[in-house]
Image (tube, rainbow, N blue to C red):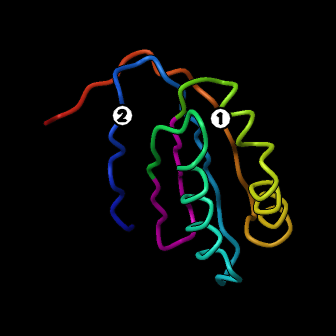
Amino acid sequence: MRDASFAQLPAPPYYAVIFSSRRTPGDEGYGAMGERMATLAQQQPGFLGIESARDADGFGITVSYWTDEASIRAWKHHAEHRIAQETGIQSWYQHYETRVAKVERAYSLK
């Protein structure tokens, strides 16, 4: 499993979008699109950060952090993000789950 970088986040509350997926074999443009989506997400109002990891068997989790639910909805409906979502459904994912949660508390080992 590759190491994930920790997002630098403000004190809660904020929202987390948890995207868990199982990839199909091969890249088929997935890596480039993932990089593009991460860059594009960072430019969206309300974006706070992102953390992502994938194991050798194709199971991965990406958590993006947002200030509010309106920002999450706007990102979900962003035109370029919609293309990535549709391509994922058609080509890149065997299965995925998306969950949205409000973060009430956060703590860490510093």
Inter-mark Cα distance, 1 to 2: 19 Å
| Mark 1 surroundings: few (<14), some (14-19) or many (≥20) residues within 10 A | few
Q: Which residues are magenta?
A: 52-65
Quadrant where the image shows the N terminus: bottom left
Quadrant where the image shows the C terminus: top left
- Residue 104 occupies quadrant: top left
Amino acid type for the residue under numbered disc 1: Arg
How many numbered marks does the figure carry? 2
Q: Position of residue 8 (x, y in %)?
A: 32, 40
Residue 99 circle label: 1
Q: Position of residue 51 (x, y in %)?
A: 44, 50
Amino acid type for the residue under numbered disc 2: Leu
Report whether 80 appears left or right of 34.
right
Question: Considering depth in this image, is 94 or 92 the residue closer to the camera?
Answer: 92
Q: Earlier in the sequence, mark 1 or mark 2?
A: 2
Q: Which residue is mark 2?
A: 9
